[in-house]
Amino acid sequence: MTRLEKLQEFLKADPQDSFTRYAIGLEYRAMQDMFKAIEIFEALVATDPGYVATYYQLADCYRQIKDKAKAKDAYQKGILQARAAQDLHAANELAMAMDELEDED
């Protein structure tokens, strides 16, 4: 059984588990299936917007497929969520990544 299959089994047992959903998104990203990873991360953001780590991964997937506008949007939303959670470290990391994105031109 692959790691992805194991994670999918965990998700069947607890469909609302944000960590498992996030881990599944990471697995698709590692397999270079950015579109499936984006699908997973977008769904997670919709159901658990406070799961801040998702925004960084979502934005990076958008960067990989060269959708700079959606990447920037994900970073901005993540910064707002991180600040709302008073997670200044995450907010700063997201802001730095967004700055790097803007410097890519």
Image (spheres, rainbow, N blue to C red):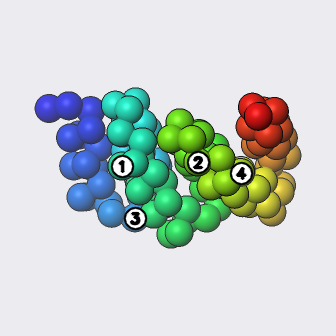
Look at the picture and state if 45 lies above or below 61: below
- Most extreme residue toward the left, as rendered? 1
Q: Judging from the image, what secondary structure is the residue with disc 3 in? A: loop
- Residue 36's disc number: 1
Tell me the kind of residue under disc 1: Lys
Q: Cα distance, mark 4 to mark 2?
A: 9 Å
Look at the picture and state if 99 lies above or below 19: above
Whether residue 72 sits left or right of residue 29 in the image: it is right
The residue wearing badge 3 is: 16
Which numbered disc flags the more N-terminal residue, 4 or 3?
3
Look at the picture and state if 103 lies above or below 62: above
The residue wearing badge 2 is: 67
The residue wearing badge 4 is: 72
- Rendered-image quadrant of the C terminus: top right
Residue 51, by quadrant, is: bottom right
Q: Judging from the image, what secondary structure is the residue with disc 2 in? A: loop
Whether residue 12 sits left or right of residue 37 in the image: it is left
**Residue mark closest to the camera, 4 vs 3:** 4
Label 4 packing within 10 angstroms: few (<14), some (14-19), many (20+): many
